[in-house]
Image (cartoon, grey):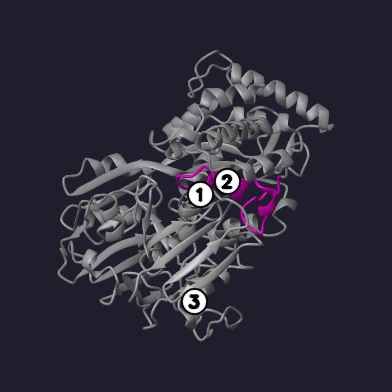
């Protein structure tokens, strides 16, 4: 999605739609509003549900809105998302205040619906996902700040709150760690009070691979299928590929077609998964604990609160033979202006910021104002050759990166057959070749387009593919296999329900808070995700450690 960024779509674009929610799910839904005092699955008694009903009554009355509220509940055809949307639909309809119709769309159509400029005009609830990183800003800025109403980015219901905007701005410009913790505590309490989004579940990144093919896979919190020796060097491990088929090819899978190969246009997980960091790279990366690590920049210095100097690696070649210079970095960053991914640069650079070339291998970036997560975010700007940069930014514009991706990464684009496969081949001139040689690497990587999660699992079990990101329902079965290794780690992503805050009765915060209290999170986790994940009442994942609040504190705010 949205900036999927991964948990924008975990297993995005799968077209198989589960029929019904099964007996266990039906029983769970039936018990949600029974009022019998039993635990509702989130560790709280039905007092939460009683308070939700009070809030609904008060909110509908204050808005002068006669129930039921009739609208669509929209989702893409991700099987798990369809399942939990069905549960939510039944729970809300059981209150008597809602009459919802579930609508399911394939991802491209769904993306157009939720990310269009007119998205706020749609009077519907939307089920979606989001993925962020180690810094709390990534969980709130693009989703909740009024500057990022669609189509600028991902504030899809065009929620606007000056106090929240101020806290978001303050949080990313404050550099004192303790002050930032206090800011994000206040911010999360305000988000719970206003409830512009309803958070459902923090997930886990899952990976399953054949033991005969791979060894030492370390799971990234943001993309379980990230195959990169350099990332794993920073993670303290080294993936090795045993080539069981004797053809030098690692066989992986994706759940949808690659929508776009140009990094300034990518708004879905599949596209970034297939190109970053295999094809494209940035100045700085991070290890799996959130520490910045050198990438195309071998070193950097912070000159003052807003000025950074980067020193580039020398001798780095793009796949088309161009040699990386500071001019490439400047032009690559500036070309983000006016694109769907503009915020990847201009959120930290600002309107008055400047990128200055000092010489071929040195450049300065001066920000408009201090930006606390700068080193974690500057690497989101991916560097491309002059051949792929428009003339207005000093490039030649001879290559359309949407059709022919060219970067500096360890693999090069080889072929793409829509609905079939995407293949990359090893870059023998890669600047990190010594790292690549530290463990056996595949000559090519094939991503087979398999939309059915059950078919992907069968292909893995049969040895037709070597690695998949499995659905939660089959994770334990794969973990029990003697031939397959299954691993997981806490994810930086969450599932959420987006209410239409511009439309009555959701213009009333009490109605939105009631919605947040009604969601049977633990039942969704148990029924849909086979117990994998944790309930989410706020936007900041436990991956961000010290910034995430306890659910109990947020529930107290929701109850008012």
Residue found at the very far top of the displayed protein: 37
Which circle marks residue 172 in the picture? 2
- Of the numbered discs 3 and 2, the one sitting upstream in the chain is 2
The residue sitting at 51% across, 30% down in the picture is 549
Task: Check whether the beta carbons of the residues at disc 1 and disc 2 lie within 8 A of each other.
Answer: yes
Q: Residues within 10 Å of mark 1 (few under 14, many from 20)?
A: some
Which circle marks residue 223 in the picture? none
Q: CA distance from mark 1 to mark 2?
A: 7 Å
Q: Which residue is mark 1?
A: 373
- Of the numbered discs 1 and 3, the one sitting upstream in the chain is 3
Give x and y (percent) for residue 9.
Answer: 48, 52
Residue found at the very far right of the displayed protein: 64
Task: Tell me, yes or no, whether the highlighted magenta stretch contains residue 140.
Answer: yes
User: Which is more toward the observer, 16 or 383?
Assistant: 383
Q: Quadrant of residue 354?
A: bottom right
What are the residue bounds of the magenta stretch?
130-159
Task: Tell me, yes or no, whether the highlighted magenta stretch contains residue 282.
Answer: no
Give x and y (percent) for residue 515.
Answer: 64, 32
Secondary structure beneath dot 3 equals: helix
Q: Which residue is mark 3?
A: 327
Q: Quadrant of residue 451?
A: bottom left
Q: CA distance from mark 1 to mark 3?
A: 24 Å
């Amino acid at each position: 999605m949205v900036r999927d960024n991964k948990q924008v779509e975990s297993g995005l674009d799968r077209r198989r739609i589960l029929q019904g929610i099964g007996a266990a799910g039906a029983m769970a839904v039936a018990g949600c509003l029974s009022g019998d005092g039993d635990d509702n699955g989130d560790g709280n008694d039905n007092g939460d549900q009683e308070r939700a009903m009070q809030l609904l009554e008060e909110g509908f009355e204050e808005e002068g809105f006669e129930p039921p509220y009739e609208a669509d509940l929209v989702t893409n055809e991700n099987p798990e998302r369809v399942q939990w949307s069905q549960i939510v639909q039944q729970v809300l309809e059981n209150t008597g205040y809602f009459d919802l119709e579930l609508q399911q769309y394939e991802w491209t159509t769904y993306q157009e619906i939720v990310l269009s400029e007119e998205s706020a005009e749609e009077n519907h609830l939307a089920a979606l996902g989001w993925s962020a990183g180690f810094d709390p800003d990534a969980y709130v800025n693009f989703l909740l700040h009024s500057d990022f109403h669609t189509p600028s980015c991902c504030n899809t219901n065009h929620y606007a709150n000056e106090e929240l905007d101020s806290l978001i701005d303050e949080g990313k410009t404050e550099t004192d760690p303790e002050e930032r913790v206090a800011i994000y505590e206040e911010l999360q309490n305000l988000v719970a009070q206003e409830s512009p989004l309803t958070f459902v579940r923090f997930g886990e990144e899952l990976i399953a691979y054949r033991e005969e093919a791979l060894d030492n896979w370390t799971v990234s919190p943001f993309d379980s299928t990230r195959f990169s020796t350099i990332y794993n060097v920073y993670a303290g491990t080294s993936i090795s590929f045993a080539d069981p088929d004797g053809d030098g090819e690692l066989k992986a899978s994706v759940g949808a077609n690659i929508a776009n190969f140009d990094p300034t246009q990518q708004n879905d997980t599949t596209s970034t998964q297939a190109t970053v960091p295999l094809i494209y790279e940035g100045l700085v990366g991070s290890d799996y604990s959130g520490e910045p690590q050198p990438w195309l920049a071998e070193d950097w210095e912070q000159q003052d609160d807003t000025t950074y100097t980067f020193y580039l690696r020398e001798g780095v070649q793009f796949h088309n033979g161009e040699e990386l210079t500071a001019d490439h970095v400047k032009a690559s960053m500036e070309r983000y202006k006016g694109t769907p991914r503009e915020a990847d640069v201009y959120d930290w650079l600002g309107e008055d910021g400047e990128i200055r070339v000092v010489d071929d291998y040195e450049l300065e970036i001066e920000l408009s104002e201090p930006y606390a997560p700068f080193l974690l975010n500057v690497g989101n700007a991916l560097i491309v050759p002059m051949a792929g940069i428009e003339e207005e930014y000093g490039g030649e514009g001879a290559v359309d990166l949407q059709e022919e991706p060219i970067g500096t990464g360890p693999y090069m684009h080889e072929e793409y057959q829509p609905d079939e496969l995407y293949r990359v081949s090893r870059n023998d001139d890669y600047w990190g070749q010594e790292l690549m040689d530290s463990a056996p690497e595949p000559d090519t990587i094939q991503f087979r387009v398999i939309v059915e999660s059950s078919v992907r699992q069968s292909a893995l079990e049969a040895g037709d593919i070597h690695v998949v990101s499995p659905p939660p329902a089959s994770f334990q079965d794969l973990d029990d296999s003697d031939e397959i290794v299954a691993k997981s780690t806490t994810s930086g992503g969450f599932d959420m329900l987006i209410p239409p805050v511009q439309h009555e009765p959701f213009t009333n915060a009490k109605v939105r808070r009631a919605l947040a209290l009604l969601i049977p999170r633990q039942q969704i986790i148990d029924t849909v995700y086979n117990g994998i994940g944790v309930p989410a009442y706020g936007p900041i994942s436990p991956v961000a450690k010290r910034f995430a609040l306890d659910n109990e504190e947020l529930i107290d705010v929701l109850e008012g």
